[in-house]
Image: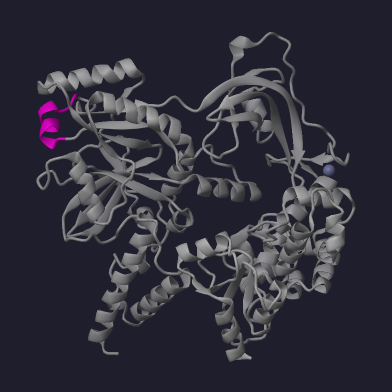
Amino acid sequence: MSKAEAEKKIEKLRQEIRHHDHLYYVLDKPAIADREYDKLFRELKELESQYPELITPNSPTQRVGGEPLKSFKTVTHKTPLLSLDNLMDEDELLAFDKRVREGLGVDKVEYVCELKMDGLAVSLVYKNGKFVQGSTRGDGIHGEDITINLKTIKAIPLVLKDEVDLEARGEVYLPYDHFIKLNEERQEKDEAIFANPRNAAAGSLRQLDPKVTAGRPLSIFLYYGSIEEKVKTHYEVLQYLKEQGFKTNPNTRICEGISEVQKYIKEWDEKREKLPYDIDGIVIKVNKLHDQQKLGFTARAPRWAAAYKYPPMQSETIVEDIQVQVGRTGAITPVAHLKPVHLAGVVVKRATLHNEDEIRRKGIKIKDHVKVQRAGEVIPEVVEVVKSKRTGHEKDFHMPKECPICGSKIYKPEGEAIARCINFACPAQVMGRIIHFTTREAMDMEHVGPALVAQLVEKGYVKDAADLYSLTKEDIMKLERMADKSAQNVIDSIKASLDRPFDRLIYALGIRMIGRRTAQLLADNYSNIDELAKASEADLSQIHEIGPKVAEAVAFFFKQKGNQRLIEKLREAGVRVKGQGARGKGPLTGKTFVFTGGLTNYTRPAAEELVRKLGGRASSSVSKETSYVVAGTDPGSKYDKAKKLGVEILTEGEFQSLIHKHK
Ligand SMILES: [Zn+2]
């Protein structure tokens, strides 16, 4: 390929990748599977490495790049990012409307209502349609230059549709599901957890190493663009931003007069708990830009806009008791048992207290009146004690010295926040480990849930994760509420887990400090479980990104006799203990199949075995990584999901001919 041809090809690939980023991250409508996207990306990267002189700062390959910064530069905003006046109740809302109407000399005003994201305000500057600088709001006049971190947010276009000069503003946020996952990972690694999604987003944007930010799936909604000369209303500004490739909130609405604004506020007060992200109010703006100019600004804030604040989703109740839970790593977590209380649409009975230090810091005693708060699906949390309601009968909580489940000593290492039961055989830990082993992100045993594991452990059928593989259908049918069909589903989903990728097994073992990513790293570096088990701390530390604490945890795990026995049992049960590379290659290597619905000519395990024999993988859940979904009679939700993700769907007949072709 000549350089000119390469240049053409590079530009074409960039356009395609941008198009798919827009579909996926802005419109939430992916059109191709992940691996197709990865292919485009790899191709671009390869060409760019052949012709490094053709790399531009706005190429999709340059989202995560550059060395960590020592500090952030200060940026002076061209026009200040003002804050909005807050309206705390209906009276203040009506007074705002009155001021606006009087200022404009009209009876009724056209407003635009937007959800007020509880995130971090940022400014994005584009020159000739190219993203050149991004900064935090800061004090409104000066912010911090966080361009390298903002570039990692895929919902932010690096190149706009038109070659325009523009400043756009918006709110960066972390969706709830990612927030929960992030905190789980941090807890796993004994790192401090984030109090709310907003703090997590702020912490992520202020990372000096853009690689850390890139690992946090932040998103953004835009609500301002400096294009006053092109349009007449604020609503048109938002439409324009959308056309240029920005993500705008779909719930924004034009409201004729204050009564429609009131309706909007009420509607979202009820609906907000169902949103996948945090909002803390509604922003109300005068729609006509000409009217905005007429109203102007006070020293602090525009006169044509205001923020109606929702009260936090909080309730008051009583801490009836504080008890501790024992997790799979032996971590002892104190939990407040509350007098049941309505909070954001659900009845709350428990709230996490995280650890002993947290209880001391908040000064929580048993029988205290407390305020509890809930954000979305996040576990409710005790915010503060209502000290004025104390009667003197409240009691201090003391961490037990012994594990409430097994009676072993509780140990809290110096400098760590979390106390642990150190008995590896503690039933609470055993159960926790087995449940972890079965989860979707580990061995993905679809029909084996926590309640079933609890029964199996209690009945003595299962003493460790490997015992799951010797269960029979008859064993399962002896349990409560287990009919023939559901027992078969349990057995099938256990069997389907035999062939999970090696990194899943590493993660499933529940080694301390080993999350999904680290498990993947280990699988990339060791081709089978024996190599990994033999690795010394020093060997492990050689791997980039694996620190001494993680290396120690891994080496420690494999030194334990009990764990060695567990791995032997898993191997005997037929669990895959090797990486992809070490596995026999076949015509279907690299292909993943998911079966849904009934098959006529095969049992499901037999069909899955065929796939495995030819080098492919059988999985029980559909993702973008899935190559084919084989749909039999009465296919279930997997079929719909496959359709949505654009995964190729085969009939049983098509599957059959595919298999025969390769046999
Ligand atoms: Zn214990």
Residue at left offset 40%, top offset 40%: 119
Q: Tell me where residue 319 appears, x and y as whole percent.
A: 68, 22
Q: Tell me where residue 460 appears, x and y as whole percent.
A: 90, 53
Using residue 494 as the reference point, say whether residue 458 is left or right of it.
right
Is 573 located above or below residue 277 in the figure? below
Is residue 622 among what the camera can see? Answer: yes
Q: Magenta span covers which residues?
A: 288-298
Q: Tell me where residue 588 appears, x and y as whole percent.
A: 59, 83
Quarter holding ligand 1: top right
Judge by depth and name the residue closer to the eye, 155 or 135.
Answer: 155
Residue at left offset 60%, top offset 68%: 633
Judge by depth and name the residue closer to the eye, 656 or 168.
Answer: 656
Residue placed furthest toward the top: 391
Quarter containing the N terminus: bottom left
Using residue 457 as the reference point, say whether residue 653 is left or right of it.
left
Answer with the quarter of the image where residue 529 lies: bottom right
Judge by depth and name the residue closer to the eye, 246 or 406.
Answer: 246
Is 296 part of what is drawn in magenta? yes
Is 71 located above or below residue 19 in the figure? above
Using residue 631 as the reference point, say whether residue 643 is left or right of it.
left
The type of colouring in the image is one colour
Using residue 527 as the reference point, say whether residue 276 is left or right of it.
left
Answer with the quarter of the image where residue 383 lies: top right
Answer with the quarter of the image where residue 361 lies: top right
Assign the magenta stretch its main secondary structure: helix
Is 251 located above or below residue 501 in the figure? above
For the image, the number of numbered tags is 0
Is 58 part of what is drawn in magenta? no
Is 38 located above or below residue 663 in the figure? above
Q: Tell me where residue 610 appears, x and y as whole percent.
A: 68, 81
Quarter containing the C terminus: bottom right
Residue at left offset 83%, top offset 34%: 401
